Amino acid sequence: MHNPGAAPGLDEAMAACERLARTHYENFSIATRLMPARLRRHFYAVYAFCRGVDDLGDAAPGDRLSHLDTWERQLRLCYSGAPTHAYFVALKDTIDRFEIPAEPFLKLIEANRRDQTIKRHATYRDLLDYCDHSANPVGRIVLHVLGHREPELHALSDHTCTALQLTNFWQDVWRDYAMGRIYLPVEDMAHYRVTESQIAGRMATPEFKGLMRFQVERARDLFIKGTPLVDLVHGFARVDLALFTAGGMAVLKLIEARDYDVLAGRPALSKWRKSALLAKVFLRTKLGLRPLAHGGA
C-alpha cells in the first residue's frame, strides 16, 4: 500500500490519482466532460483517497486495521507535515487549496474500521450514524471543493448521500449477507418478523417484502429532502447531483417493480436505462426543470 521511499512530485502524484479514477470509475468519463478543467485534478485526488480507504477496508490482505492506521497517518501529514504516498501528496494540495477540514476524511477511515468488527446494526439510528461516517463525508468534501461551506447545504447533502448509501444497501441485501453483513436494522427485522435464516435461504416472504417496502420509503423520503440542493449548486455539479438523485430513485423504483424481492438477484439499472436517464436529467437541468420525482427514464 505504501512506498516508504521519497515522495513523488505533485504532478506525478496527481497523474497517479487520475489513472486510478479513469481505470476504476466508469462514471468519471461522463463527469469530467462537464467538470471545469481547474477542478478535475482535485476530484481525482478526492476519489483516490475514497477508493483507497474503501479498498483497504474491504479487500486488503493482512491486518486491515493496521493498514487503515497507516492511511490515517498519511492523512494527518496532510495537515501537519509532508505525506509520502502519492495519493496524499495530491490530496494535500487539494486540502490546502480548498481549506477542507480533516473531519470528513477521518470519518471515512472510521467507517472502514467499523466494517472490520460491526456486522449488524441494532437500530435505524445506528445505521444512520454509520452512513454519517461512510457516505455523508463524501458530499461534504465535494461541496468544499465547489466552494460551498454553508451548513444548510451540507445538511441537504447529508440527506442525499445517506439516501444513496441506503439504496445501495437495499440493492445488496444478499451480496452483503454473503460477506457476513446485514444492514437491515435488527429492530426492524424483529418488527416485521424477518429472520437471518430467511435471508440465508433467499426467501422473499411477505414479511421480508414488507420490511423492504418500509426501507425503500425511508430512502425515498431522504432523496426528496435532499432535492433542494440541486437548485443551490451550479454548472456540472447541478447535473451530477440531479443524476445521482434520479439514479437512486430509479433503483428504488426497480426494487418496487420486483415486488421488493432483492434476494433473487441484484436490482440494477441497465446501461441503456442509465444512458436514457443521463440524457433526460441533462435536458431537464439545462431547461431549469425540477429533478425527476420518481427516477423515471
Image (cartoon, grey):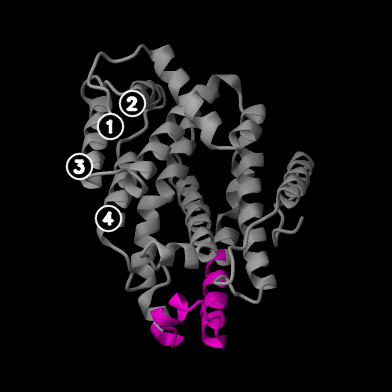
| Label placed on residue 66 | 3
Distance, label 4 to label 2, CA atoms, is 23 Å
| Amino acid residing under circle 2 | Phe
196 to 294, vertically: above or below: below
| Distance (Cα) linking label 1 and label 3 | 14 Å
Give the mark nearer the N terminus: 3 vs 4.
3
**Whether residue 190 can be seen here:** yes
Q: CA distance from mark 2 to mark 1?
A: 7 Å
Relative to the observer, which residue lies in front, 222 or 196? 196
Residue shown at 50%/46% (left/top)? 153
* 10 Å crowding of disc 3: few (<14), some (14-19), many (20+): few
Q: Is residue 69 above or below residue 76?
A: below
Quadrant that contains the C terminus: bottom right
Q: Quick check: 267 above or below 270? A: below
Decide which of 103, 264 is in the foreground and name it.
Answer: 264
Q: Are marks 2 and 1 in contact (CB under 8 Å)?
A: yes
Residue carrying label 1: 75
- Image quarter where the N terminus lies is top left
Q: CA distance from mark 1 to mark 4?
A: 20 Å
Give the residue number, with chain letter if any, for mark 2.
88
**Residue 41: in magenta span:** no
Sequence-wise, the earlier of marks 1 and 3 is: 3
Q: Nearer the viewer, residue 242 or 41?
A: 41
Cα–Cα span, label 3 and label 4: 11 Å
Residue 37: image x %, image y %?
59, 20
Give the mark toward the camera: 1 or 3: 3
> In the image, which residues are magenta?
190-219
Q: CA distance from mark 3 to mark 2?
A: 18 Å
Q: Is 248 left, or right, of 294 in this rendering?
A: left
Residue that badge 4 annotates: 116
